[in-house]
Amino acid sequence: MPQAGKAALLDTNVILRFLLGDDAVHSPRATSLMKRLESRAEVADLEDSVLAETVWVLQRGAKVPRLEIVRSLGRVVGLAGLRYLGGKRVLLDALASYGATHCDIVDCLLAARAKSRGSKVYSFDSTDFKRLKCAWREPG
């Protein structure tokens, strides 16, 4: 298993090929990697931007229903060999908020991170942060 800090970074297209199974060449390879991550034979890091882009492509491009996105990505985030520097709980909380509201995934990620830190979000968009019961403030 790779040392801490030396883990590969997981890209959106790998997650999409795994979840959608839509490419005869890449989908089986993505599935193989996910199995290695599940068994901790490999370790990879997941960034917020990759999660957000994956949600966007699934929702807008592939027209996957919101709750199916939450279920599918929850499985991916839960893989034993997948790390997230902000903590998996933050990602899982953000996905849960995304599934329970009509808020954007980025706002859900920000709210989950702010709550985990006990901090607030600066934003001009109060609507999502009110829905997410997150401390927020307009800059100024």
Image (spheres, helix red, strand yellow):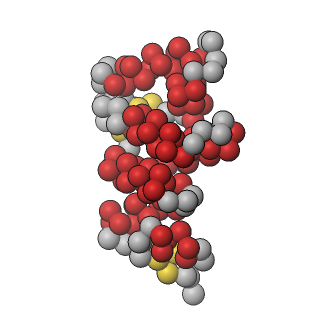
Instruction: Return the residue nearer the eye: 52 or 66.
Output: 66
Report which quarter residue 84 is drawn in. Answer: top left
What quarter of the picture does the C terminus occupy? bottom right
Counting labels gives: 0
- Left or right, 91 with respect to 98, comes to left
Q: Residue at x 51, y 41 (%)?
A: 69
Estimate the x, y position of residue 1 in percent, counting from the top left.
30, 23
Estimate the x, y position of residue 77 in percent, counting from the top left.
39, 38
Question: Vertically, is 96 above or below 126?
Answer: above
Report which quarter residue 45 is drawn in. Answer: top left
Question: Vertically, is 10 above or below 125?
Answer: above
Q: Confirm whether residue 14 shows in the render.
A: no
Report which quarter residue 106 is drawn in. Answer: bottom right
- Left or right, 60 with respect to 6, comes to right
Estimate the x, y position of residue 7 in percent, counting from the top left.
39, 32
Q: Confirm whether residue 16 shows in the render.
A: yes
Q: Residue at x 31, y 35 (%)?
A: 4
Instruction: Return the residue nearer the eye: 104 or 115.
Output: 104
Question: Vertically, is 75 above or below 29?
Answer: below
- Left or right, 111 with respect to 16, comes to left
Estimate the x, y position of residue 47 in percent, counting from the top left.
48, 45
Q: Residue at x 47, y 19 (%)?
A: 31
